[in-house]
Image (cartoon, rainbow, N blue to C red):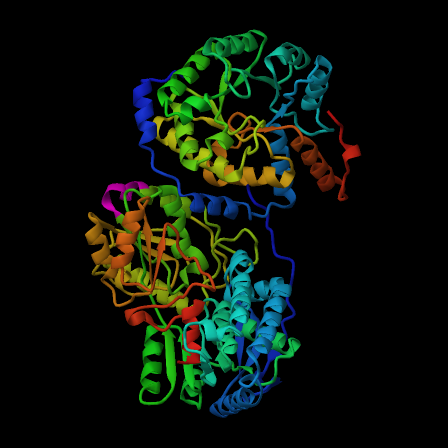
């Protein structure tokens, strides 16, 4: 037996005991505090201030002042220099950020090290390049910033979602007030420290920690635009709150993506894509390939190989470099995954899980594959946001498209076939913001990302993503 | 085991194999390369890798003295390190190697069939094989007729492998696909299956004599082929990457790939080999480093 000895990451970031709110370039305290825990051990990592409505108003005022006096008037070239500096600092501190993200979120170090942090840095590099070229983005001769942007981000990719939000906003000349998720504020606060180190003018970036009430106070505050990534329910509430105001809004919400495997697919690679599609980041991915639609003629073979492959996934200590699947982010999320999985069993789907030991403490869920899933079941309709795959079969290409589109969501989809014409045929018919062909969960700063239907509106990344932060 | 298929049947089965997605295959290989193998696992993997080496010399300048020196190194690489699996030489050196290794468990492998190009008439390739076996070779490393393969004459390649298999008798047959010349992953998959249908005991990537030799994605693809072949036929076939694997880190990546593609059944030198020469000394230096805690150097392992 080739057993891999524990390979723990040795770098330990300097995590402070307590973090304040980052307003106007300084950390300030607040009346209330809350704890942030490590979901893989349930140990308290640090305490953090909870921003009140008054704190939100102060942060927005600081952002307003910075936008009007410093950041807005600054030339694009100069703004670009700051963004390049931030990107380089992120690269320099990559290992520290990767470990911190893993500890605060529960995701494996392999992913934070090889995906989250490098991709976040790439977003800053990419948008740094745009800062002095906005006139060439096809959005008018001299596009202007919106002003102050309120941004609320989720817990599944804390640093990366921060980068997706802050990099384009700053490149376009806006200033930001950003609220990270209450369970994962650490890397946003470390990013605030990094902004200090980069000598970013005070007030350009403000970070307010807190829960839902802080978020809604931010949405209701005197910002010019709200950008949100998270659940469809909260997205709907935000859309209502800003309706009738001058505030612009972009929303990136839930998904229930179909990953379609045709009978002429490269099977071994499709299996890799299915695994990456649903078990990457414990399935805490809005564009996760949570519904596998596989052609009946190859279903048996695909499932046999899939189970073999899933059995190899190493679930456990997120800081072990060989861990493939880490901890579920919170007790609340674990409860939701468990409840939906029970619903799947109750509705008659067949459940399969690999035999693997789970750590005693922390929040854990075994990779799960449901077969015999019908379109009418909850596990085929509702977003589980966990390592749970629902497998459905289809007989003809038309049926695959019909089933794939039969969801209120429309964020992403995957198509697996060796035939180029079939890829194009399917991509034309799939109602999803992103369609991946013979791959899944690929992201690039130059490629716009966003949804249709209840998955939200607006795009992030690429030339198209700039439109969300410019007055055009 | 002899093949029960006709050449036409084998050729049509091979032509019907599904394609390989190059991006996905390379991504999987890259993913496997990130496994971190440390401390006790590393020590275990190093010894396993040493025991899987076909210690090779294939030069025009090979002499009996050079081959004896290599055989001595294969038998006792360093202190309590395990012996290598085999030494691999040209047919003219088989008798020398056989004598030097007599009574040990270390096997003698001989390249044959007009190695490395294989561009000689079939009767010469068969005679080459027979003479190596007569001289005592335990294993024959043959090359396939890439010209015929690329020209689409799969039946001819199939029959030639079958003929060499017959000429090799009891010696185990390793079939070198020369993947660097086949160039595409689709053709590597087809050649792997064709060789197995024709009775290969091992499929091997390369001669080590062309620009591109063993790569991890190619070897992963060949591992998937032997895995699927056993599932279909019940027959287990070995895999041998050769050429270009020079250090411990790379060797461990291959072993991780065996572990997570084929599992325990292939993690023995009966079913997995490294065709290499300079790899052994790097493994020995890493072995010394693990034992003593400080870095070794080239003068602390023997030249061969």
Depth order, front residue of A279/B131: B131
Residue B206 part of the magenta-drawn span: no
Image coordinates of residue A469 in percent, x first then y, are 44, 78
Outermost residue to the front: A141
Q: Main secondary structure of the magenta part?
A: helix
Image coordinates of residue B109 in percent, x first then y, are 58, 18
Residue located 42% across and 53% down the image: A276
Image coordinates of residue B166 in percent, x first then y, are 44, 11
Image-based side of B24 in relation to A13, left or right:
left
Outermost residue to the right: B299
Depth order, front residue of B228/B102: B228
Seen in the picture, residue A31 relative to B225 is either above or below; the reply is below
Residue A296 part of the magenta-drawn span: yes
Image-based side of A86 in relation to B81, left or right:
left
Image coordinates of residue B86 in percent, x first then y, are 61, 21
Seen in the picture, residue B159 relative to A304 is either above or below; the reply is above
Residue located 48% across and 31% down the image: B265
Depth order, front residue of B151/B60: B151
Whether residue A384 appears in this view of the structure is yes
Quarter placement of the C terminus of chain A: bottom left
Whether residue A460 appears in this view of the structure is no
Residue located 43% across and 69% down the image: A463
Depth order, front residue of B288/B28: B28
Q: For the magenta stretch, what is the residue range?
A: A295-301
Q: Quadrant of residue A125?
A: bottom right
Q: Quadrant of residue A254?
A: bottom left
Seen in the picture, residue A198 relative to B82 is either above or below; the reply is below
Seen in the picture, residue A201 relative to B209 is either above or below; the reply is below
């Amino acid at each position: 037996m080739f057993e891999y000895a524990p390979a723990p990451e040795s770098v330990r970031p300097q995590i402070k005991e307590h973090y304040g709110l980052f307003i106007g370039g300084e950390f300030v305290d607040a009346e209330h505090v809350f704890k942030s825990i490590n979901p893989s051990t349930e140990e308290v990592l640090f305490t953090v201030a909870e921003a009140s409505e008054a704190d939100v108003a102060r942060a927005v005022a600081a952002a307003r002042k910075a936008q009007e006096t410093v950041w807005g008037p600054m030339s694009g070239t100069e703004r670009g220099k700051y963004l390049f500096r931030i990107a380089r600092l992120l690269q320099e501190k990559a290992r520290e950020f990767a470990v911190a993200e893993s500890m605060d979120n529960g995701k494996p170090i392999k992913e934070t090290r090889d995906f989250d942090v490098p991709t976040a840095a790439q977003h800053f590099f990419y948008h740094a390049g745009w800062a002095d070229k906005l006139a060439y983005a096809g959005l008018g001769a001299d596009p202007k910033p919106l002003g102050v942007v309120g941004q609320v981000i989720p817990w599944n990719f804390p640093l990366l979602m921060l980068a997706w939000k802050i990099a384009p906003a700053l490149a376009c000349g806006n200033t930001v007030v950003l609220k990270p998720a209450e369970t994962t504020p650490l890397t946003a606060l470390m990013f605030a420290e990094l902004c200090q180190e980069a000598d970013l003018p005070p007030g350009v970036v403000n970070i307010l920690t807190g829960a839902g009430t802080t978020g809604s106070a931010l949405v209701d505050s005197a910002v010019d635009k709200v950008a949100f990534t998270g659940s469809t329910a909260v997205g709907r509430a935000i859309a209502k709150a800003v309706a009738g105001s001058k505030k612009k809004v972009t929303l990136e919400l839930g998904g229930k993506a179909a990953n379609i495997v045709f009978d002429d697919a490269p099977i071994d690679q499709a299996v890799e894509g299915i695994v990456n599609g649903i078990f990457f980041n414990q399935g805490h991915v809005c564009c996760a390939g949570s519904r596998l639609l596989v052609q009946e003629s190859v279903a048996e073979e695909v499932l046999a190989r899939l189970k073999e492959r899933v059995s190899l996934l190493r679930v456990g200590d997120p800081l072990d470099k060989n861990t493939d699947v880490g901890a579920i982010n919170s007790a609340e999320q674990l409860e939701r995954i468990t409840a939906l999985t029970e619903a799947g069993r109750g509705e008659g789907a067949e459940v399969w899980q690999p035999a693997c030991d789970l750590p005693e403490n922390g929040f854990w869920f075994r990779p799960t594959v449901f077969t015999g899933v019908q379109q009418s079941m909850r596990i085929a309709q509702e977003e589980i946001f966990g390592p749970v795959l629902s497998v459905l079969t289809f007989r003809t290409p038309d049926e695959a498209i019909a089933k794939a589109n039969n969801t209120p969501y429309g964020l992403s989809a995957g198509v697996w076939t060796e035939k180029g014409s079939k890829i194009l045929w399917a991509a034309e018919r799939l109602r999803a913001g992103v369609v991946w062909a013979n791959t899944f969960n690929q992201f690039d700063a130059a490629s716009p990302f966003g949804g249709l239907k209840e998955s939200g509106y607006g795009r992030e990344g690429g030339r198209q993503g700039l439109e969300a932060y410019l007055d055009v | 085991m002899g093949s029960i298929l006709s050449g036409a049947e084998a050729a049509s089965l091979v032509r019907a194999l599904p394609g390989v997605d190059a991006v996905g295959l390379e991504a999987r290989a890259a993913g496997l390369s990130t496994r971190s193998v440390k401390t006790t696992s590393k020590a275990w993997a190093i010894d396993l890798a040493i025991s899987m080496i076909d210690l090779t010399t294939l030069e025009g300048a090979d002499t009996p003295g050079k081959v004896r020196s290599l055989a001595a190194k294969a038998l006792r690489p360093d202190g309590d390190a395990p012996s290598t699996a085999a030494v691999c030489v040209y047919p003219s050196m088989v008798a020398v190697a056989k004598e030097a290794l007599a009574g040990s468990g270390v096997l003698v492998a001989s390249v044959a069939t007009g190695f490395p190009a294989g561009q000689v008439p079939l009767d010469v390739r068969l005679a080459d094989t027979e003479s190596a076996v007569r001289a005592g070779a335990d294993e024959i490393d043959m090359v396939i007729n890439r010209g015929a393969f690329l020209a689409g004459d799969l039946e001819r390649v199939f029959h030639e492998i079958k003929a060499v298999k017959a000429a090799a008798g009891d010696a185990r047959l390793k079939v070198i696909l020369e993947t660097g010349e086949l160039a595409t992953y689709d053709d590597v998959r087809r050649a792997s299956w064709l060789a197995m249908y024709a009775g290969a005991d091992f499929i091997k990537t390369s001669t080590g004599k062309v620009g591109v030799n063993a790569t991890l994605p190619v070897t992963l693809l060949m591992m998937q082929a032997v895995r699927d072949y056993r599932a279909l036929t019940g027959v287990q076939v070995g895999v041998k990457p050769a050429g270009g694997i020079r250090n411990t880190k790379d060797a461990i990546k291959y072993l991780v790939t065996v572990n997570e593609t084929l599992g325990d059944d292939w993690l023995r030198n009966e079913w997995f080999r490294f065709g290499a020469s300079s790899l052994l000394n790097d493994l020995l230096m890493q072995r010394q480093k693990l034992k003593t805690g400080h870095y070794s150097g080239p003068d602390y392992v023997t030249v061969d």
